[in-house]
Image: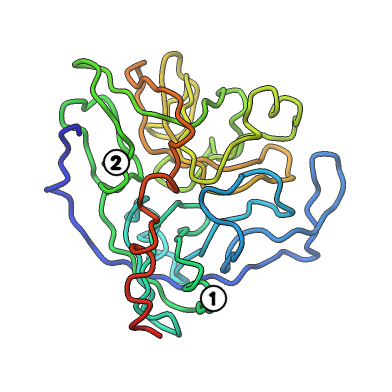
Amino acid sequence: MLRTNASDLVEMAVSGTISQPALRYPGYVPDSGGLAVVLPGMAGVVYNVRVGDPAFGWAADHVEPGVSVAHSDEGSDFALHYLTCVGNEAVVTSGLARGAKGVVTGEHARILVAFSEETNALLNVGDTVQIRTHGRGSELLDYPHIELKKVGPRLLAAMRVEALDARRITVPVALELPVRIMGSGAELTSEYVDQDLMSGDRALMRELGVDQLRLGDLVAIRHADHHFGRGYREGAVSVALCIHGDSVMTGHGPGILTLMTCAEPCIEFTFDRRANLADYGLLDGELLDGGLEEAI
């Protein structure tokens, strides 16, 4: 385990509510072939799509696994986005599932949280969820040129990051994504929300093996510098997490959330299909079910 400043990080509570899905009238979204379609998409409680499931193949658009949490006040919602890190603990604080625990698995338009199936069955839109934020300001003390983003200490410990030498580290990932297929989200800061890959060319997705991408997979992108946005830089490397499913929209597809980035070729990676949140032990039953029995 690499040296970090975890003991110096502040843990703080933030809260939001489970979001109601919403559609813009008349509900139709044009796909990459010009066909207008109506599909379920973001927000709410998603019962049958979970971390570890395929990112492709669902009859949906930008489907978010698990539960989506937001706050109606803009400043409070920004606090949710900027302070919350993947791997943070969440707990339901109202409703039938009060006391049930979950784990943050990503950040999209809302914060994404995994709860057990038993908890999901008890949740209602509007229930409050409190997150114990931990990870903002994380550093690799011996590698200051490698910046950490949105990664909580629990996730970082599970990622099996290792030192190679005084400048380089290595991390297992499930897939490599070519920088040329990265699309919507390049205009956003990497401290806030994800970036979509462009999946409209299905033949290319099969050729690259990207159609095998799973929700929760760690991925690597060469020549992608995510320090102050998401741009091309020769030799840079970024590591990210797949957090939502495919999209029919041109320029969109499964979304990836930045976890670490370096402007130099100092992040090496190996391929391991187990490099997925579902295989890290963070979503084990006892972690997600804690407090549910007392709530019932």
Say what amino acid the circle numbered 1 marks.
Answer: Ala
Q: Position of residue 45 (x, y in %)?
A: 56, 68
Write the residue at 46% across / 42% down: 257
Q: Residue furthest right?
A: 35
Q: Position of residue 222 (x, y in %)?
A: 47, 20
Give the camera-side residue of 171 and 142: 171
Left or right: 125 in relation to 96: right
Which callout, 2 or 1, points to the residue nearer the camera? Answer: 1
Q: Position of residue 249 (x, y in %)?
A: 73, 44
Against 286, residue 243 (above or below) is above
- Which residue is tagged 2? 156
What distance separates the C-alpha of mark 2 from that of mark 1? 30 Å
Question: Mark 2: which secondary structure?
Answer: helix
- What numbered label is drawn on residue 121? 1
Write the residue at 36% across / 50% down: 281
Left or right: 174 in relation to 283: right
Q: Quadrant of residue 157?
A: top left
Give the camera-side residue of 145 and 187: 145
